[in-house]
Amino acid sequence: MPVLKKTLLALGILCLSTASALATHYPLTIDNCGMKVTFDKAPERVVALGQNSAEIMLMLGLQDKMAASAFWPTKVLPELAKQNEKVKVLTVEIPTLESILAQEPDFVAAQLPLLLGPDSKVAKREDFAAVGVNSYLSPGVCTTTKNTGDIYGSRKQMWDMTQLYKEINDLAAIFDVQDRGDALVASFKKREADLREKFHKGNKDLSFVFWFSSASPSADAHMSGKNSASGFIANMLGGHIALNTDAEWPTVSWESVISANPDVIVVASLDRNRWVLDRAEEKIKFLKTDPAVSQLDAVKKGHIVVMDGQAMNPTVRTLYGAEQVAAQLEKLGLN
């Protein structure tokens, strides 16, 4: 047999072998947050509870499989807007169980225990199992401990992208689109590596606080804990969180923030409009006008940067948020 013919035949066999290896063989059983979930086929009507669950599915090109979504702290990524137009939004806030079941889903994927779990305001996993609906919870939130009395729990170890990659790979396997999952993970790994290479040359070890929101200027602030996704962003940029707490989303007094005296204050931009201080411009206005807070070194030096609030959660947005903060640090000469 000619060499060229042998080579083409070998490549053909290799391609067939690779495609076969990537294909999902049903029934597929996934171990998700300590629960075994079995799929006899790829789901056809999904309700995505949480922006992260929805955006992962859109990135995987699964919009035709999505019956609805809910809980959107910010707008969808611009590059996913067209795909998202095809998907019904139940609410940008917390949906009811009845509104979810009205979509006749065969699968529910959730971003937060607030939306799915024993202490959820929406439903327990058993509620969906009772009506024959499989459920999935983001693995990144399953690694928190719940001994703080806070529904968001705490972390002994810093969240990192491996937990997000597991979520992408799990969903890609469930829907039999594993090649798309592999490509998405590979692109994220490269972006993370590029960012680390750029910022770890500076060796500044900046201290950060990430302010998500507050019910009012006099209320304690919802800040990111040191091992949260925001902690991972600070680490990626060669720094650390100034607040020494394992809690995922502690409420922190401004006296504590003043005592920590961070080098950089990252304020979240949110579209949900639950509180006035959801808006980044209102946060910045408070920082610059409050008699005590305005004396922080970061405020006086103008080291305030804005980041998409969803990126402070352990999500696909985390990397986008890191890139957003990195660009502003470079302009401030803090890289």
Image: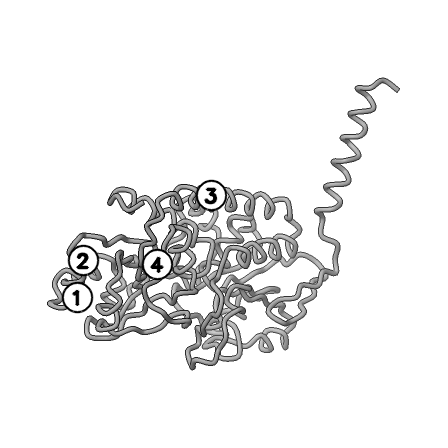
Q: Give the labeled residue for mark 4.
A: 309
State the separation of the CA atoms marked 1 and 3.
35 Å
Between disc 4 and disc 2, the foreground one is 2
Q: Secondary structure at mark 3?
A: helix
Task: Tell me, for residue 293, which label it has, or none.
Answer: 1
Q: Residue at x 74, y 57 (%)?
A: 26
Q: Could you classify mark 3 by the number of other residues whose Cα lies within 10 Å: few (under 14), some (14-19), or many (20 or more)?
A: few
* Amino acid bearing label 4: Gly
State the separation of the CA atoms marked 3 and 4.
20 Å
Q: Give the labeled residue for mark 3.
A: 191
- Residue 135 position (above or below residue 5): below
* Amino acid bearing label 1: Val
Q: Which image quadrant: the N terminus? A: top right
Q: Give the labeled residue for mark 2.
A: 299
State the separation of the CA atoms marked 1 and 2.
8 Å
Q: Position of residue 305 (x, y in %)?
A: 26, 52
Q: Position of residue 49 (x, y in %)?
A: 49, 64
Q: Could you classify mark 1 by the number of other residues whose Cα lies within 10 Å: few (under 14), some (14-19), or many (20 or more)?
A: some
Front-most of residues 59 and 190: 190
Q: Position of residue 80 (x, y in %)?
A: 45, 47
> Left or right: 1 with respect to 64?
right
Q: Secondary structure at mark 4?
A: helix
Q: Residue at x 79, y 19 (%)?
A: 4
